[in-house]
Each structure stands twice: as C-alpha cells, then as structure tokens.
Amino acid sequence: MAWIWTALSAIIVLYLLEQLLNLKKKKKLPPGPIALPILGHIYQFTKNPHQKLHHLAQKHGPIMYMRLGYVPAIVVSSPATAELVLKTHDLIFAGRPRLKASKYISYDQRNIIFSSYGPYWRNMRKLCTLELLSHLKIKQFQPMRRTELGLLVNSLKQAAEIRETVDISARISALSGDMTCLMVVATPNLGNYFPLFGVLDLQGLTQRMKQVNKTFDEFLEKIIDDHVQNKKNQETQDFVDTMMGIMESGEAGFEFDRRHVKAVLLAANCQLHGALVSGMAKTSC
C-alpha cells in the first residue's frame, strides 16, 4: 500500500507544479469544457464518445481544447476546420506521438507507420515505393502470396466439409502472424496519458511489450540470418533479400541497418493483415 500513496503524492505534486507553470505561461488555447485536476477531460469519454464530442462542439465551437490526463489535444468538428488541419496545413499535423508501443513494437519508430514526417519518413517512403512496392516487385512476389492464400483457402474448405464454424479474422491473423502484437497494442496504456504511470509500469504493459519485442526480434533475426546464409542458393529474391541487398550496398542514402529491416517487416506484416481482412470482408458481402 505504501507505493500507492507514494504514487498519488507524486501525481499531486506534479499537478501543482504544472498549474504553477501554466499560470506563468498563460497560453492562448481554444475554448473547451472544464477539466478535472489530473484527469483532465478523460471523464468525458464514456459511452458513445463521438456523440459527446458533437454536443461539446455545439457548445464550445468547431475547435476545442481538451486535456487527456497530461496530454493536450485539439478536437476539430467541422468540415472547414478539418480541411485546414488535414489538407491546407497537413504537414504541421503530420507528426506521431512517442508511445511505449511504438518504441518497442516498431524499433523506436523506425518503420514508416510510426515515424514522424521528415527526411527519414520521406526516404523510407521512397525506398518502400521504389524497391518493395513497385509493380515489378509485387508481381515477383505473386507466387508466394498465391501459395499462402491457397493453403488458407484449403483449410477453409476442409472446415466447410466437416461443417466446422470458422473465425475468419482469427485465421487471417494467424496467417499474417500479428495476433500477439495486436493484443498488446490494443490495451489502453495509462502511461500515454499519465507519465508517472508509465515509469512505474503499474499495468505491466511495458514488461509485456518488451517480451513481445524480444519474441519478434528473435524471430526476425532468424529469418534474416537464414536469408544471409542461403543467399547464394536462392534463384529468386524475396522481400527480405531486397532489403538486405539495399542495406549491404548502401544505396538507401540514409542510415539503414538490421533494425530498419525488421521494422519494415513488422509494418508490412500489419499492412498485410489489414488488406486481407478488408478483402475477405468485401468478398463475403
């Protein structure tokens, strides 16, 4: 129990210090609802948060300031202001928050999904577009995709023959191999809103993410090592071979090592899962 009181005391002290600093700065912020001490506006997000935000926007205007714990947020609720944020000034708002999940799951935000907009993101996008997602490369990987999807379809046929109920999403998640990642990332992390909780790891999420990262890292390292050892015996290049060739040749034009290769592989895995789920959903409609 002693650590609970210590944590609460630390939170209260941090809150009082924050209030003292805010009094000195006097930032010009958009209007918004009244915030609770420490919690901010999290209490507003109960059931149907989109409806709650709509009602708040009618009262406070199309641009609202809200605080989620210690994280400031701006809520945009009209087409005109949304266009300003997402189109006119999109580069200003194109950053990515530094979350615990992105640190451990994406190799410290080294993949294109979690990295913030800037020279590194532009270089990674160019690399993926030209070397990994070009028409030639996609066509080259077609036999592999056909084989894997064929195995999935055959397993569904066998299940249909014995009239077995099949969870399509679970099968596709197993195919893309990201179920463990989803279980960790999908859990709300209080440390993202209350930094002290992240330091103390009261939910145990940081430890779990480290374990997931270790599992993925060992698996991806084995894949890379196998490709390096069997490079001379392979007749065709696959996804990993292409990235390893770029890394060894230095053609990327920016820092690109094994960490970046593994980060791209994880990002590609998540993209594959989304594409497969979307495609199966459209097929079943």
Image (tube, rainbow, N blue to C red):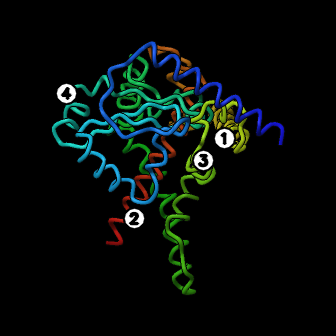
User: Is residue 242 something one can see in this rendering?
Assistant: no
Q: Residues within 10 Å of mark 3 (few under 14, many from 20)?
A: some
Cβ atoms at labels 3 and 1 below 8 Å apart? yes
Percent coordinates x, y for residue 276 in the rendering? 43, 57
* Image quadrant in which the C terminus is located: bottom left
Image point (20%, 35%), residue name: 81
Left or right of 115, for residue 177: right
Q: Residues within 10 Å of mark 2 (few under 14, many from 20)?
A: few
Does dot 2 land on a helix, a strand or a loop? helix
Q: Which mark is residue 88?
A: 4
Q: Is residue 48 above or below residue 10?
A: below
Q: Residues within 10 Å of mark 4 (few under 14, many from 20)?
A: few
Eye-nearest disc, 1 or 4? 4
Cβ atoms at labels 2 and 1 below 8 Å apart? no
Q: Residue furthest left?
A: 80
Cβ atoms at labels 1 and 4 below 8 Å apart? no
Cβ atoms at labels 2 and 3 below 8 Å apart? no
Work out whether residue 91 or residue 222 is closer to the camera in this orientation and state it. Answer: 91
- Amino acid type assigned to the residue bearing label 2 in the image: Met
* Image quadrant in which the N terminus is located: top right
Q: Which mark is residue 216?
A: 1
Residue for badge 3: 181
